[in-house]
Structures are given as structure tokens and as C-alpha cells.
Amino acid sequence: MGLAVAVNLGVVALGTTAIVAAPSSSVGNGTAVMSTAAPSRGTAGQRLLTWSGITWDVYPNCPDCGPEQTPTTNAEQAVYVDRRGYLHLQVTKIGGKWRGVELRALTRPTYGTYRWIVDTATADMDPWAVLGMFVYRPGAKKQTSEIDIEDSRFPRLLPAPNNAQFVVQPYFVKGNLHPYQVLPTDHPLLQQFTWSPGVTFGGPGRVDYETRVGSSSRAPLLAQWTYTGYSVPNPQSMQLFMILWMNKNTAPTTGSHSAVIRSLTIQPLGG
């Protein structure tokens, strides 16, 4: 699917000047303009990072701020932008605990296409590591109001050899999840979803997903899926996130527990 990029996160950071309070544990799951400048900092341990044209709130050092009450960190070695403008995310052991990283965009999402290019060979990640980009409505009923792209083997959940999935929450409802396999040679990955309203007022919304092996919209197609149903949320109070964490608070054992993101772009619907 072609995409006329309106915002190139690999060139500028998701930009906004808003300053918000650091997230609490009630804020659920969680996505940068190229910048090698030191991140700005707010109060209460808040760290702001500008990457791919967006300003991100990096979740603080917290014992239970991540999914399933997993620990998070905003340490410099866990979240940083390299000289190429690529974003690095790293599950890091701090204070005796393995901590994931979660970033929330300060700009509010709307209908449109959300695309990121993952430089990492996600098939080589630790079985319990989860890399995700999603929109979500904090405070909503659990496992609702969320659109996800996730790279993980999800032991005991996804049937092998699948190690990635497209999801419209709740994931356990039949037809709301599409798993697929990524090979170790499949990188970089272009992953995206296009979020659209219902055709009729009050009707079901639509999400079109795709993953390509490469960094352009003409790269070979690996997976494609369309969801049309009433689980598609509207943009009201939604927020955009990126995350890398260890499912079930499991310590990494085999494979990597880091990820590199080249860019993230947003094309508003009709833009």
C-alpha cells in the first residue's frame, strides 16, 4: 500500500511543546524526529525525547508502570537516539530488576496510517520480549480501545512458528487477532496500520495492517490483514505508544532484548 509521508519521524521528532506529568501505573501500554540532542527533562523524574518529529514522554523508573504491572525505566542506556537518527530501546537490569521501556507521544493521534521501520531482526529476540507500536485510550475498560502491532513469540499464546501479530483489542475475541511468522532474515521490517472510521455513522470501524520486508512501500509483502468491526475505537482521548518489555516479567535468557527503530511516520486520513 503506498503512503505519501506527511510526517517523517526519521527526519524529525514527533513534535509538540506540551509538558505533561509523568504517567502513573494506571496508564496502560505504550512510540520519534531524528535528534541527537540531549533529551529535555520535566519534573518528577520525567524525561522527554524528541525523535522522528515527535516529542515522547519516556515512562519513568517505576515498579509497575508497564503492561501487566511490569517495571519500566527512562535511563539513558535504555532509550537513546544514535548518530544515524535511529531510536534504540533496551530492556535493562537496574536495581536488581529487568525493566522495559515505554514511550508515549505528546501529540494526540487521529485516523490515518501509522508506520514504523524496525531495523532489528525481531525473530532473534528473546521468546518473552515484546516490541510494540499501538494506539490506546488510557482509563478504558481493560483490553479494549487499542490497536496493536506486536513482535513477539508470546509463549503459550501464539502457535509456533508465529512470532508477530496484528491485534484489535480484545485479542481473545474471535477474529480480532492475526498472527504471522517473521524469519531471522526478514529485516528491516516496514510495519503499519491504517485506522479508519465506519462507512456509516455509528457503524464498525476499519483497520488495514501490513508488514513488508524492507523499508519502502514497494518492498515484498510479508503479511496483510483487514479488521472491520465494532472493536475499532474512535480517536477520542486516544494516545500513541511504543514499547519494549518482557512478558510475564520473565528475565531474558536467549536471544536479544533490544530493538532499533529507524523511523516512524504518520499520514493523517485524507492528508
Image (spheres, rainbow, N blue to C red):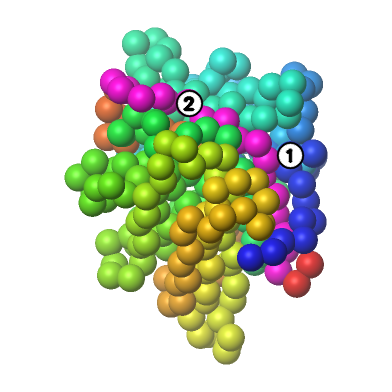
**Where does the magenta region start and end?**
252-269
User: Which residue is at the front of the view, 117 or 169?
Assistant: 117
User: Which residue is at the front of the view, 158 or 43?
Assistant: 158
Q: Amino acid at mark 2?
A: Ser
- First along the sequence among labels 2 and 1: 1
Q: Residues within 10 Å of mark 1 (few under 14, many from 20)?
A: many
Residue 204 seen in this snapshot: yes
Q: Amino acid at mark 1?
A: Gly
Q: Residues within 10 Å of mark 2 (few under 14, many from 20)?
A: many
**Number of callouts:** 2
Specify the principal SS of the magenta part. Answer: strand
Give the residue furthest to the top: 95
The C terminus - image quarter: bottom right
Q: Where is residue 132 drawn, in percent x and y?
A: 48, 44
Instruction: Judge left or right: residue 150 versus residue 87.
Output: left
Q: Where is residue 30 drawn, in percent x and y?
A: 51, 43
Residue sitting at x 39%, y 31%: 125
Residue sitting at x 68%, y 25%: 81
For the residue labelled by badge 1, is the local secondary structure a helix, a strand or a loop?
loop
Q: Which mark is residue 160?
A: none
> Is residue 258 rendered magenta in the image?
yes
Q: Where is residue 206 drawn, in percent x and y?
A: 52, 74
Q: Which mark is residue 258?
A: 2
Residue 18's place in the image compared with 41, above or below, is: below
Residue designated by label 1:
10
> What's the CA distance linking mark 2 and mark 1?
19 Å
Give the residue furthest to the left: 156
Instruction: Judge left or right: residue 267 versus residue 21.
Output: right
Residue sitting at x 64%, y 65%: 1
Q: Where is residue 40 drawn, in percent x and y?
A: 74, 24
Residue 26 seen in this snapshot: no
Residue 59's place in the image compared with 54, above or below, is: above
